[in-house]
Amino acid sequence: MKKERPVCPHCGSNQLVADGSLEFDGAAGEWRAGSEIYNESCLCRNCGRSEFNPEWKEHKFTVLTPAHATLDLGDPPPYCSFDVDVDLIEKIKSVREAIQSLALAEASISFGGWWGPETDEYRLQGGALVIASSGSFWASDMRKHESYYIESEVIEVDDLLALWETATTGSVHVLAAHGDEAVELLAEYRTDTIEPPVDDH
């Protein structure tokens, strides 16, 4: 799987069709129509622009999910967010295959999520992404001097893989939350990630 894929230079979407009929093969990283390969003269399904050459960018987007503490009296972070790129997708696929072949209940890989603007103050002890045999996964970490974990909500691997194929590069997607909760979570995240203006005086 290639790191880069073509995106629309007008809106950033990767929902492109070449020459009005040819589809981009994300796994191979190529335009395909029979035995021919195309990489120009595209139509964007997202914004409707046509007859442009795509820009090639590393495909990466952000996942945002509610978070909780494993202790009822614990102090949960506001949310967990993490970037999804080709390396993470390949790791999750590889671990899931190992779990199935070895009949394991779960396995984990080293992983660092972002738990809101106070992440640096948490003095985290080294996070993990836990992948279960049920086909789900979640992020987990522990603050220094605490006896409980902070965790993201559970996400289905298949949901993430489907999102990988459709998400616009650079976009933010809320998973494991719906309706008003998802709207509020995204608003809080965007507020936290807006850089303050620089004072030149």
Image: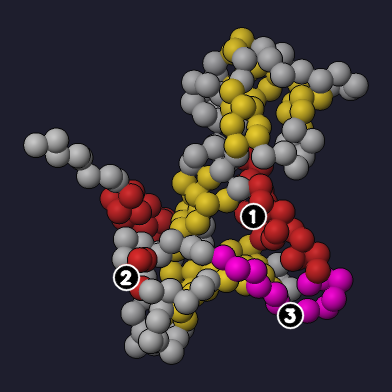
Residue that numbered label 2 is attached to:
121
Residue 142 in percent (x, y) is at 46, 79
The secondary structure type at the circle numbered 1 is helix
Residue 145 in percent (x, y) is at 38, 87
Q: Residue furthest left?
A: 201
Q: CA distance from mark 1 to mark 2?
A: 26 Å
* In the image, residue 163 above or below residue 181: above
Count neighbours of disc 3 (C-alpha within 10 A) and say few if under 14, some if 14 to 19, many if 20 or more: few
In the rendered structure, the answer to whether residue 9 lies left or right of residue 166 reads left
- Check the picture and name the quadrant holding the C terminus: top left
Residue drawn 50% across and 49% down? 62
Residue drawn 55% across and 19% down? 48
Q: Residue furthest top?
A: 51
**Of marks 1 and 2, which one's residue comes earlier in the chain?**
1
Over which residues does the magenta segment extend? 99-111
Amino acid marked by disc 1: Leu
Amino acid marked by disc 2: Glu
Residue that numbered label 3 is attached to:
105
